[in-house]
Amino acid sequence: MSYFISFEGGEGTGKSTQIKILKERICKTSNYQCLIIQEPGTTNLGDKLRVLLKKETSPDHSITYLSELLLFSAARSELVTKVIKPNLEKPNLIIIADRYVDSTTAYQGFGRKLELNQIELINKIATHMIYPDLTFLLDSDPEVMFQRIISKSETNLPSNLNTRMRKDIKGTRKFEEEPIEFHKRVRTGYLKILKSSSERMVKINANQDKGIISDLIWQKIRNNIPNLK
């Protein structure tokens, strides 16, 4: 049997770190294999849309929020069709997603203030109604996370939270460029999703030591997935 796990949270909450730790732990202590997927990305179309969605542009050439929503959803539909659905049919596999459908609701719905009813419909279409078995929400005050990002970034960066904080390996921009009020709305969105999805979503305080966080994640997974030590 296969399982689908996703990691959600605001910028700088440590999702990538915890995914790496979890993968190593699973592979060392069980017969399960791990498949890490990223949104947007993983597929050929997803990688191209990732560059388009996150690259630096002038205000005159930026895409509309609705277009952003639809492009993220197109990448997700491709990911579900070509990667998630086929791999869910494989035995002894755990798919771990670095962001999934909840990111769209939190970022485009609450952050961008797009219509939530429309987003819900688009999400259903893009996911083919495939949702994670378990979702970890790494939660923290955005101001705390941005100070952490600044401290880890290259020197001589200004401390203004509206400025660019970091880039990914392709040099494309990230949502850290948005004002702090945007990220507070995103966090509010995640917490509202948590209330309506408590059967699959687990909130974890992202301000804790990464070892404590990884142990909490592991304990929850062991309770939900058989044959893990």
Image: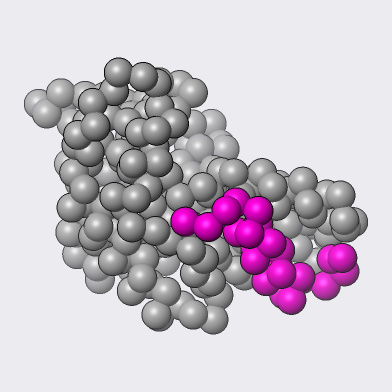
Q: Position of residue 148 (x, y in %)?
A: 40, 41
Q: Position of residue 86 (x, y in %)?
A: 69, 53
Q: Position of residue 64 (x, y in %)?
A: 17, 41
Which residue range is magenta in the image? Answer: 207-229
Q: Is residue 56 magenta?
A: no
| Residue 189 figure quarter | bottom left
Residue shown at the point (48%, 44%) measured from the top left: 39
Q: Is residue 219 magenta?
A: yes
Q: Could you say which is closer to the camera, residue 72 or residue 211?
A: 211
Residue shown at the point (77%, 46%) measured from the top left: 24
**Above or below for 13 versus 188:** above
Determine whether, in the image, residue 209 is placed left or right of residue 223: left
Indicate the quadrant containing the N terminus: top left, top right, bottom left or bottom right. Answer: bottom right
Q: Position of residue 47 (x, y in %)?
A: 48, 31
**Above or below for 55 versus 212:** above
Determine whether, in the image, residue 205 is placed left or right of residue 164: right
Q: Could you say which is closer to the camera, residue 226 or residue 123?
A: 226
